[in-house]
Structures are given as C-alpha cells and as structure tokens.
Amino acid sequence: MKRLLLSLLLVVATPVVAEEVVLGLSQDQVAITADFDGSEILLFGAVKRESPILQDPPLEVVIAVSGPSGPLTVRRKERKFGIWVNADAVEIDHAPSFYAVATSAPFNQVMSNVEDQRHSVSIPRAIRSVGAPMGIEDAQSFSEAVIRIRTDEGAYQVLENTVSVDEQTLFRTSIKMPANLTEGDYPTRIFLTRGGKVISNYETVINVNKVGLERWLFDMSRNQPLLYGLMSLAIAIAAGWLASAAFQVLQRR
C-alpha cells in the first residue's frame, strides 16, 4: 500500500511540458557534387501546447547547426630575424568545422549565460580547448583566432533576429551552408526559451555526403592512392599538352 501511494504521488508531482517543438526541414540531406557551390537549408516548425499562450515574457527560438568536430592545433607566428616563424601553439580539443546560430532576438536576450553554459549553444561555448602549455598567458586568444578566421570564411555564423516567430506558434529561418562543407552529420538543435530560460528543445540531423564524380574521386584517393596519383599526373600532362597545342594554333593564325 505504501509503494502504491508513493508511485501515485510521483506521477501527480511530475510536471507537464507546457510547450514543445515540432520541427520541419526543407531537406535533411545535402549532396556535394563536383559543381557544388553551397546550399541553403530552410528550417521551420511549430510549438505544441498543453496550456494557453503566455504573453509575457514572449516565446523566443534559438537554432544551432553544427558540423563535424575535431581537434586542431593553433599556432602563433612571430617575426624573428626578418622572417615569420611558428612560436606558441595551443591544442583545441573540439572545434566544429561549421557552426551557425540563428535567433529570434539578440542572443543575450533569448538565452541566459547559465543556459548557454548548460547547452553549449554560442560559438565560444561550442569550442573546447585543452589546458594550454605553461608560459602561455593569453590562451583564450587562440580560440578567438579560430572563431575570427572561420567567421571570415563563412564557416561560423551568428544570425541574430533571423528567426521569424508568428503568433508565438510558428517559426522559420534559413541557414546558408558554404561550398567547403565537411562530409558527415550536422546535428541541428532547436531551443524554445522564455525570459532567457530553455523550456523545450529538439534535435535532428542533416546529413552531408559527396555523390557522383566527387564521391568516386574521394574514394579513389583514400582506397587507391597510387592509381589516383597516376591519374592526376596523366590529366595534368594531357591538360598541359592541350593548352600548348591550342596556343600554337592561335600563333599560326
């Protein structure tokens, strides 16, 4: 009897999720072909509710798309004796090859620092660095350099005020993915927030793969490197010969 009563109390005390995400994607796969020059993914969804809409604070949406992650070494160059040489180096343990964050309002308004730490949503939180070697005082600047370089390349994107939320129920945004995508799975996370606190989240995956000629060449370079090298050499020789022949024909004219 006591066990039954305890179970009943636990069920009654369990909170009901008032709002949760129902997500859609324009496509869940991106095919990298020989002429691939990027892709634009449309993300849209709705909010399912078990209670009336709260007007204050308003519902906000945060969407984060992350590419395959891996370690990398960041080196600082210094000028010594008139030449640039590698100096200090810091190992970055975890850095996504692509990362985009889209929000319905400025990021610091839609998600508190505590929630950002918990879910690792912002770009600086998405990068994890191993302890820097002794003697390097500004180790944080190495992570900042990765963010700055990849932001300039379009691989890291902060898209504030780009998620449209209609009647606190429907939301949509689009994220442009650059041409130099890394093959693999791209986890996509959607967060509903109120007053900076996460009230619901949802995760799905966008798959990015090479197809056609691009896939054939990639597989050959990995599985048959000698044949791939000989073929590349033959193509280079043929291209050079054709260019020379065309130049001679033009000179005769």
Image (cartoon, helix red, strand yellow):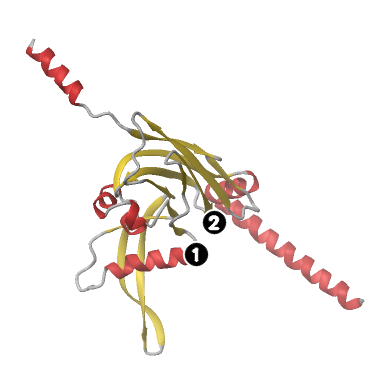
Q: 81 above or below 5?
A: below
As helix, strand or loop, the secondary structure at mark 1 comes to loop
Identity of the amino acid at label 1?
A: Glu
Residue at the farthest top position: 1
Q: Position of residue 225 (x, y in %)?
A: 55, 52
Q: Earlier in the sequence, mark 1 or mark 2?
A: 1
Identity of the amino acid at label 2?
A: Pro
CB atoms at circles 1 and 2 under 8 Å apart?
yes
**Residue 153's disc number:** 1
Q: What residue is pinned by disc 2?
A: 178
Q: Quadrant of the C terminus?
A: bottom right
Instruction: Specify few, some or many for label 2: CA neighbours under 10 Å numbering under 14, 14-19, or 20 or more.
Output: some
Q: Quadrant of the N terminus?
A: top left
Q: Would you say residue 167 is visible in this rendering?
A: yes
Q: Would you say residue 94 is visible in this rendering?
A: no
- Left or right: 31 with respect to 200? right
Q: Quadrant of residue 52?
A: top left
As helix, strand or loop, the secondary structure at mark 2 comes to loop
- Residue that appears at 54% across and 46% down: 41
Name the foreground residue: 27 vs 18.
Answer: 18
Q: 141 above or below 227?
A: below
Name the foreground residue: 149 vs 7.
Answer: 7
Residue at the farthest left position: 2
Name the foreground residue: 49 vs 8.
Answer: 49
Q: Position of residue 145 (x, y in %)?
A: 37, 69
- Residue that appears at 13% across and 13% down: 4
Instruction: Specify few, some or many for label 1: CA neighbours under 10 Å numbering under 14, 14-19, or 20 or more.
Output: few
Q: Position of residue 161 (x, y in %)?
A: 44, 55
Q: Quadrant of residue 251?
A: bottom right
